Amino acid sequence: MITRWQRNSLACLLLSVSLSTTAAGVHQHGLAEAAVVVEGEQVTIRFRAPLMDILGTEQPPADVPARARYGKRLAQVAAPQPSPAAQCEPVSASISSVDSLFPEQQAHDSHDHHDHDAHSHHEDVDNEWLFSCAFPEKLNAVDLPFLDTFSSLTTEVVLLLPAAQSALRLAPGETRIPLE
Ligand SMILES: [Zn+2]
């Protein structure tokens, strides 16, 4: 019996392995990572992508209008859509926001610091959503509608399902993660 904690740890581990370069701050632009973990009625979906592919930049916003622009763009990385037949309800979410990525005081950092980091600094969008599903056995796909918007991304997906673990790859523009 694999506990939820172990499953989530495994998902993190799998993501960490496949994202090993990210830990060093050098991700690959154009490559996103996702994980779908199904355990009992609970479905956890994680999505991680280089900020470059979401915003077109990884630099802190220069001014207030830029902050607002970043915010709108980040909000487009919206909740996944599990199969309607499974009747899943959102339980909680952990979402990358402008404030989490670029805290206000950082925007006022000295220019020296900014220039020094300008070519070595990478940021990721890292979102996680938790759903509770009335009919998890009817869950046969999860759709990530925003992948249609951010069509530069190829997405490597790890699946941890009750029956099996597997991996697949979504080509740019593909939004549907099949679970069977
Ligand atoms: Zn980058």
Image (cartoon, rainbow, N blue to C red):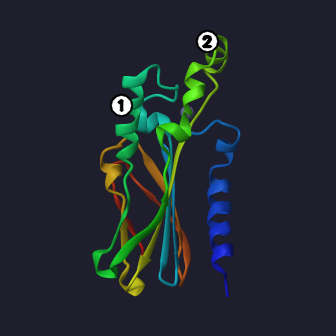
Tag 1: residue type? Arg
Which secondary structure lies at badge 1? helix
What is the distance, in whole Å, between disc 2 and disc 1 at their CAs?
A: 22 Å
Q: Quadrant of ligand 1?
A: top right
Label 1, on which residue? 69
Q: Depth check: 113 or 63 in front?
A: 63
Label 2: how many Cα within 10 Å (few below 14, some 14–19, many 20+): few
Q: Is residue 103 left or right of residue 53?
A: right
Q: Depth check: 53 or 67 in front?
A: 67
Q: Which mark, residue 100? A: none
Q: Position of residue 135 (x, y in %)?
A: 37, 86
Label 2, on which residue? 111
Q: Above or below — where is 56 with respect to 62?
A: below
Q: Is residue 23 left or right of residue 75?
A: right
Residue at position x 39%, y 49% in the image: 77
User: In the rendered image, is residue 29 in sight?
Assistant: no
Q: Earlier in the sequence, mark 2 or mark 1?
A: 1
Q: Is residue 119 left or right of residue 70?
A: right
Q: How many marks?
A: 2
Q: Position of residue 98 (x, y in %)?
A: 48, 37
Label 1: how many Cα within 10 Å (few below 14, some 14–19, many 20+): some
Which quadrant is the C terminus positioned in? bottom left
Residue at position x 42%, y 38% in the image: 54
Q: Quadrant of residue 142?
A: bottom left
Q: Above or below — where is 82 with respect to 103?
A: below
Residue at position x 59%, y 27% in the image: 105
Q: Above or below — where is 42 with respect to 128?
A: below
Q: Position of residue 117 (x, y in %)?
A: 65, 21
